Image (cartoon, rainbow, N blue to C red):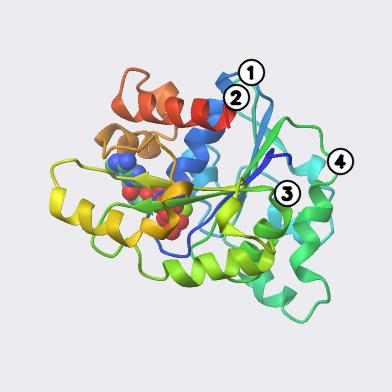
Amino acid sequence: MDNNIIAIINQKGGVGKTTTSINFAAGLAMRNKKTLLIDLDPQAHSTVGLGIEPESFTFSITDVLTRKTPIRETILPLRTENLFLVPSHIRLDKIEQQLAPELFRETFLKKAIDGVDFDYIVIDCRPTLGTLTINALYAANFIIVPCEMGRYALDGFADLMETIEHVKNADFNKADFIRILLTKCDSRNKVSNDWIFQQLEPFKHLIFNTYIRRNEALNQSQMAQQSIFDFKADSVGSQDYEQVVNEFLSL
Ligand SMILES: Nc1ncnc2c1ncn2[C@@H]1O[C@H](COP(=O)(O)OP(=O)(O)OP(=O)(O)O)[C@@H](O)[C@H]1O
Ligand SMILES: [Mg+2]
């Protein structure tokens, strides 16, 4: 099975979806893979996080989902070689509601990206399981679920896995299309880490061997509107995202 369209999904907020989308996409681009990052979140954090200001572009993912503009006309080149972006805008929020009565609304993104010429497409999702996220799930052939190593890490996790199972008609026992990525890890939090690992036991075979450690440079890179590789190449965050890209490419 192909694994070139990757949705970064978790309906829980602030777990590292955007940080992972930006740096995973940038990591693929660094490996000479022509990579498209689609910002599918009205918060537009991937867009702003890569230095694209909300009023600086004409077309966004909104125009793609309303089928006004072909996706290729919305693609912006970025400073990083091989990395391209379909930007998002707060208007996308309204579009999600407008799509609600439309037939086949969950398949619009899949149809839109059909035939675009990239080695990899990475989709940053909003923290809900609504129409936009379901569009990403339909379009994707690989799913990364960032899971923050914290007390509420597994809130809603069962619902999320159930949704993925349903949309992808999946069997998690032999699932080669999904990986859980542990983020903001701190080995000093032994008790809470042990608790999370216990809860994740049924999904243990789906966890990437690479963990993303808590690293202030990752936080700062988002404010500096750069990938971690451009912002601080020798940081822990840079090492971890490079390693998870390598692990993914070796799957
Ligand atoms: N490994 C990490 N170490 C330190 N800070 C991190 C790490 N990963 C993410 N962060 C910070 O945590 C915050 C939330 O991360 P991020 O925006 O990636 O989450 P998200 O899941 O995309 O959030 P949302 O659900 O709102 O879209 C950001 O300020 C980000 O810089
Ligand atoms: Mg985000």
Q: Residues within 10 Å of mark 3 (few under 14, many from 20)?
A: many
Q: Secondary structure at mark 2?
A: helix
Residue type at the position of mark 3: Phe
Task: Please identify, in this view, whether the residue under mark 3 or under mark 1 is nearer the observer.
Answer: 1
Residue drawn at point x = 13 percent, y = 42 percent = 188
Label whose residue precedes the other's in the sequence (2 or 4)? 2
Q: Does the closest atom of ligand 2 sit within 8 Å of the Cβ of label 4?
A: no
Pick whichever, 236 or 45, lies toward us.
236
Residue drawn at point x = 28 percent, y = 65 percent = 152
Label whose residue precedes the other's in the sequence (2 or 3)? 2
Horizontally, residue 46 falls left or right of residue 236, namely: right
Spatial CA distance of label 1 from label 2 is 5 Å
Residue drawn at point x = 72 percent, y = 30 percent = 119
Position of residue 13 measured from the top left corner of the image (x, y, whole percent): 40, 62
Give the residue at mark 4.
115
Give the residue at mark 2.
29
- Marker disc for residue 32: 1
Q: Secondary structure at mark 3?
A: loop
Q: Pointer 1 and pointer 2: residues touching (CB < 8 Å)?
A: yes
Pick whichever, 43 or 177, lies toward us.
177
Label whose residue precedes the other's in the sequence (3 or 4)? 3
